[in-house]
Amino acid sequence: MPDFATYPSLAGRTVLLTGGASGIGAEIVRAFAGQGSKIGFIDFDAERSEALVAELTEKGATVAYASADVRDIEALKGAVSALAEKNGPATVLVNNAARDDRHGWETVTPEYYDERIATNLRHMFFATQAVAPGMIAAGGGSIINMGSNSWWESTGGMPAYTTAKSAVHGMTRSFARDLGPHRIRVNTLVPGWIMTERQKELWATPEALEKHRDRQCLKDLIDPVYVARMVLFLASDDSAMCTANNYMVEAGSI
């Protein structure tokens, strides 16, 4: 594992993340804990959330979680408020929660389509709306929206998901313009195929991995830690002049 950087500006900074109990989200929580940030995350998996909090608290980290289904906007807002009471208002927001469930275009119903949008896009808007006033009062902040390179690659088999993820980019750029005068930066992080346990269990067959390696300029499989490291950079003062843009972590996938 590389000898990663420490960002002094992240020490003591209050961070809010959605979808933090497992996968990429859990790696991001660990990364902020390692920087000395005060990290709060939202998830509906109580067992994994409590295990992660216990793991990091034992190491001296300041970490808390609030239970909510991000598809329920009122519950999401309540979780944001609960974590702000514990850690203070967030000046970093990582809109991470998502699910890339596969589905054929032929069977998508209006109800399923709406659920995919709620799972992969809508909560990002309302989480931003909930934290922005606190960032404005603090004099600035960083919002990181998790995109996906799946639509860049014209990936099939999940059109409602790729529709939602492509829309993240427009939302990012609009919020960057509206919040920029308050020194709030808004960026999209674009992961490639990241080797989380979920991906390994469901879709990372030897054949699929070999095909995907052929599309990457770098042939290594991508560990979630590399997404977390880009999040840290975008949250830190080192990226103070970075906004309204896409930051790819996909090994040059084409």
Image (tube, rainbow, N blue to C red):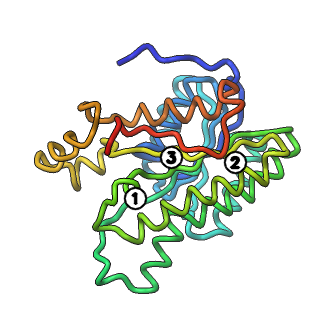
Residue at the (44%, 50%) spot, across then down: 47
In this view, the mark in front (1 or 3): 1
Residue furthest top as drawn: 3
Residue at the (63%, 53%) spot, across then down: 172
First-in-chain label (1 vs 2): 2
How far apart are the two marked residues, 3 and 2, measured between alpha carbons?
13 Å
Q: Which mark is residue 24?
A: none
- Does residue 251 appear left or right of residue 131 in this picture? left
Residue designated by label 1: 151
Tag 1: amino acid? Trp
Q: Secondary structure at mark 3?
A: loop
Q: Which mark is residue 20?
A: 3
Q: Secondary structure at mark 2?
A: helix
**The N terminus lies in quadrant:** top left
In this view, the mark in front (3 or 2): 3
How far apart are the two marked residues, 1 and 2, measured between alpha carbons?
33 Å
Percent position (x, y) of residue 186?
67, 46
Q: Residues within 10 Å of mark 1 (few under 14, many from 20)?
A: some
Is 195 placed above or below 132 here? above
Is 210 placed above or below 18 here? above
Percent position (x, y) of residue 70?
57, 63
Residue at the (22%, 51%) spot, across then down: 201
Residue designated by label 2: 83
Q: Secondary structure at mark 1?
A: loop
First-in-chain label (3 vs 2): 3
Tag 3: amino acid? Gly
